[in-house]
Image (tube, rainbow, N blue to C red):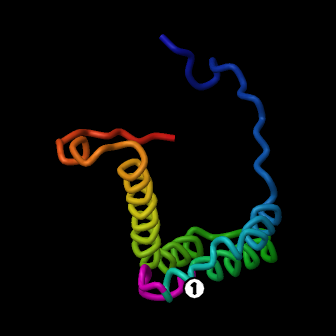
Amino acid sequence: MPPTGADRAPAREARPAPLTDYRDAIKVAAPVLDTTEQAKAGILPGPSPNLDMATAFLDAVIADETVSNETLAAFAALANPHIGPLLAGVAHAQLDACDAIMRQIRQTQLTEEEWASPRVLVLFP
């Protein structure tokens, strides 16, 4: 029987990075996380406000040095409606990348006869 409770050996104390480090990393990554181009391309219904919302939320938590369950729940409820479109945008980008790979394989590695016969291709990194 595995040890439980007080019988369990103490785990290595993990110290999460300060929230300021996380917030700063998000700010540095902001150009990559910007969804304006995806919105212009019609992939997303509009630029996602989640980056700005997350940064503002972290700034408030850092300033207050605490966060209540209610405040966390309110942030989650505010951010939640924007997650689906972001996931759809990611899926769209993955499908585009897969299509590009398939086109390259078709053009460089398969004959017309090979392409015409059904096959299963498993792609992985």
In the picture, measured across the screen, residue 14 lies left or right of residue 82, that is right
Describe the element under mark 1 as helix, strand or loop.
Answer: helix
Q: Nearer the viewer, residue 15 or 108?
A: 108
Q: Residues within 10 Å of mark 1 (few under 14, many from 20)?
A: some
Q: What x and y, as percent, mark residue 51?
A: 63, 77
Q: Is residue 25 above or below residue 61?
A: above
Q: Residue furthest left?
A: 117
Q: Nearer the viewer, residue 32 or 61?
A: 32
Was residue 21 drawn as part of the magenta stretch in this picture? no
Q: What x and y, as percent, mark residue 14?
A: 76, 39
Residue at 52 percent of width and 14 percent of height: 2
Which quadrant would residue 89 be assigned to in this image?
Answer: bottom left
Residues in magenta, as a range? 41-49
Question: Dominant secondary structure of the magenta stretch?
Answer: loop
Residue at 81 percent of width and 58 percent of height: 18
Q: Nearer the viewer, residue 17 or 41?
A: 41
In the picture, measured across the screen, residue 112 lies left or right of residue 5, that is left
Disc 1 residue type (three-letter)? Thr
Which quadrant would residue 28 be assigned to in this image?
Answer: bottom right
Residue matched to label 1: 36
Was residue 46 drawn as part of the magenta stretch in this picture? yes
In the picture, measured across the screen, residue 48 lies left or right of residue 84, that is right
Query: How many discs appear?
Result: 1
Which quadrant would residue 62 be assigned to in this image?
Answer: bottom right
Residue at 53 percent of width and 86 percent of height: 47
Q: What x and y, as percent, mark residue 100?
A: 43, 59
Q: What x and y, as percent, mark residue 26?
A: 72, 69
Q: Is residue 10 above or below residue 118?
A: above
